[in-house]
Structure formats: C-alpha cells, structure tokens
Image (cartoon, grey):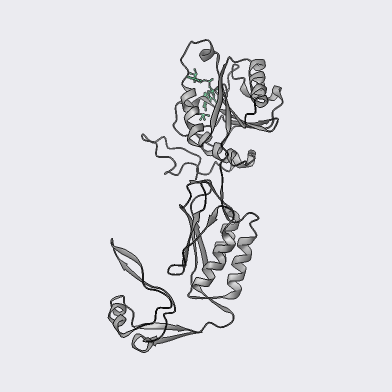
Amino acid sequence: MIQVVRIEDAVGHPLAHDVTEIRPGEFKGPAFHRGHILSCRDLDHLRRLGKEHLYILKPEDDEVHEDDAAKAIAGALCGEGVGWHDAPREGKILLRATRDGMLKVDVTVLNRFNVIGEVMCATRHTHTLVKRGEEVAATRAIPLLISRKTVEAAVSEARSAEAGVLQVLPLKRAEVGVMITGSEVFYGRIEDKFQPIIRKKVTDLGGHVIDVVFLPDDDALIAEAALKFVERGADIIVTTGGMSVDPDDRTRFALAQAGAVDMVYGSAVLPGAMFMITYLKGVPVLGIPACGIFAKTTVFDLIYPRVLTGEKITRREIAELGHGGLCLNCRKCVYPMCPFGK
Ligand SMILES: Nc1nc2c(c(=O)[nH]1)N[C@H]1C(S)=C(S)[C@@H](COP(=O)(O)OP(=O)(O)OC[C@H]3O[C@@H](n4cnc5c(N)ncnc54)[C@H](O)[C@@H]3O)O[C@H]1N2
Ligand code: MOO
C-alpha cells in the first residue's frame, strides 16, 4: 500500500525510495537515499527538487519494493562472468563483467523478459568484447512497488535461459596456424600483405601464431599443410586467399579433400561474402578471402572471437550476421564503435 503525505508530515519517517536530483552537465543521482530519516533541514532541498509530497510505503504481502525487485531480477539474469557489487541506486542495478571476454546475450529470452512489462533490462550488444569491470547491462523494476507475481514471472523468464541471459565468456589463448595461399605470392610475383594483418588480429586477442606457411594454389599441398597444423596441435587454422570463383581458388576444395566437415562457404556479410569456416579433425579452419588485405574489418573480426569462446559456427550463426552485416567502408574505421556486426 502507498500513502501520500505532505513533506512536512513526513519528518521523522524513513524515505521510501532514493530521491533523484538532476543538475544538467553537473550531477545526476540520489540527493537522498532510501531509509534516510527526514528532518526539517531537508525540506527546502526537497522543495527545490519539486517535491511537496512523499510516499509512505506499507508493502502488502503481494508487493515488492523496487530495490528488492531489482536484486531478484538481476540475480536471475546473470550467468557466468557477470555480476554486481553496488546496492541498487534509484532502483537500478548496473551489471558488470567480472572477467575479460565476450559478452553473450540470450536475445530471445531478453526480449521475452522485456515484454513482461514493469521490469526492464538494457544491455550492450551480444558478442561485444569487454574487459573486467565494464558495464554490460542494467536492470530495474519500473514502479516503486511491483507485484510479487510480476517479479516471479520475470525471474522465471530470465532463468529459462540455460546459461543465463547475460554471460561473459573467456577467450581461449589460441595457438594458430596460418596458411597463406596464392601462387602469385608463393612464387614471389607479388609481395605478401596478409601475414602482418593476421598476426596482429591473432595477438590482439591473446593468441599465438605457431607458424605461417606459404602455399601455391595446389589442392594436395594445401590439404597436407592443414593436416600438419592439426598434428602440431593448432587450436585454430586461418587460411587466406583462394576463396572466390576462379579455377585457381582451391582452398575449400583442398580442405574438403583433407577431410574437413561442416563447411559453411559464403557469408551474409560484406566485406567477407566469400568467407569459409570448416572443421578439420575438430579444429576450426577459417578461410579469409582476399578482401581481408583491403578492408580493415571483415566477417573474420565478427566470427574469430566467437570461435575463441569455443562456439561451434554453423550456417545459422553466419546467416544471422546478415542484419547489420553491411560495412559502410568509412574513411576512418572506428569498429567496433559502429553498426557493423551489431
Ligand atoms: N567475378 C567475381 N570476382 C570476384 C568475386 C566474385 O564472386 N565474382 N568475389 C570477390 C570477392 S567478394 C572477393 S573478397 C575476392 C576474393 O578473392 P580470393 O580470396 O579468391 O583471392 P584471390 O583471387 O586469391 O586474390 C584476389 C587478389 O588479392 C591478391 N592477394 C591474395 N592474397 C594476397 C596476399 N597474401 N598478399 C597480397 N595480395 C594478395 C591477389 O593477388 C589478387 O590480386 O574476389 C572478388 N572477385
Ligand atoms: O568476400 Mo568479398 O567481401 O565479399 O569482398
């Protein structure tokens, strides 16, 4: 139950909720905290905040205070690698990464949770790379007193996500084998431009390049080199070039001959329509088309971190990249602070 009283009559009573003050460009936050015992000295301050009345709360059994609702739903939303340590502020809880890694949001369950009404959770995009301590989401109840049934429905919806609606998955420090294909590079007709690009992308995400091998457009040699990397214990193999439509583009055929399975060739992303991912004796092999030497960011940057979390990439995961998968080729690339891959 909520009772309204004039602020003068609330003196000596605890505040029912945080009272917000906003001074543009200067401050936004609680001027008074829930539980603060109101004194005469507070009255002018409250009037400056536009408050002439306050609530006295007497929650019924079937009602929950916003702070308690926020704690219940936050607990239900968090999976591994996500948590919070601060008390609710103005009824809201900020959820943070408790380790470095990739934020994974169960968007389907998040949408079902937010459709319930009277509760909300706003998140960063799924698959964003985050550092320990960074904000990943925030959640709260909308009313000051919310029905217990609604909180229970929200908690149960959030828990329907097996691993939690929000997780931060650690990235494997991968040992990566790199195969640079193309007879023009192998025979020295042109200088290789791929090696430094791949090395940087691998090391930036904590990986180590085992070796870089150069190969002509020859099925048998490409197949043999890939199998050798598997034998040498590579966690991931990256191949470059030879991914499009001419007869010398052999990489995907060579890998199939080597025994690679679950191959997805072609992606709903530009740059990177000619991308390939396949699995050779369980080792993911990522084929980067030659656009990777021209464009700073490609489908590789979207998929590679996911592979480092151990996610199995199928046609479905590649297809889902189509929405938001068009890079605008900005003069100065600011990825990931742009719509690409979101
Ligand atoms: N008629 C069509 N042409 C192209 C298509 C298509 O569908 N129809 N796809 C285009 C797309 S999309 C891309 S991306 C590229 C993909 O090319 P490939 O991965 O097959 O690359 P290559 O044919 O082997 O080489 C293309 C170009 O890049 C140079 N290259 C390759 N590797 C290196 C390297 N390590 N260092 C320096 N330069 C490299 C190569 O010499 C060629 O000039 O195809 C489009 N074309
Ligand atoms: O694989 Mo290519 O992007 O579509 O240039």
Above/below status of 144 relative to 231: below
Residue 253 at least partly seen: no
Seen in the image, is 170 located left or right of residue 34? right
Instruction: Identify the residue at image location x=50%, y=60%.
Output: 84
Above/below status of 6 relative to 241: below
Residue 199 at least partly seen: yes
- Quick one: 233 or 163, which is closer to the camera? 233
Q: Please provide percent x and percent y for residue 256.
A: 69, 25
Q: Please provide percent x and percent y for residue 42.
A: 31, 80
Instruction: Identify the residue at image location x=43%, y=69%.
Output: 90
- Quick one: 87 or 3, which is closer to the camera? 87
Seen in the image, is 153 located left or right of residue 38? right
Q: Please provide percent x and percent y for residue 97.
A: 50, 52
Q: Please provide percent x and percent y for residue 10.
A: 38, 86
Above/below status of 317 relative to 20: above
Question: Which quadrant would residue 338 be assigned to in this image?
Answer: top left
**How many numbered tags mark residues here?**
0
Instruction: Identify the residue at image location x=65%, y=28%.
Output: 233
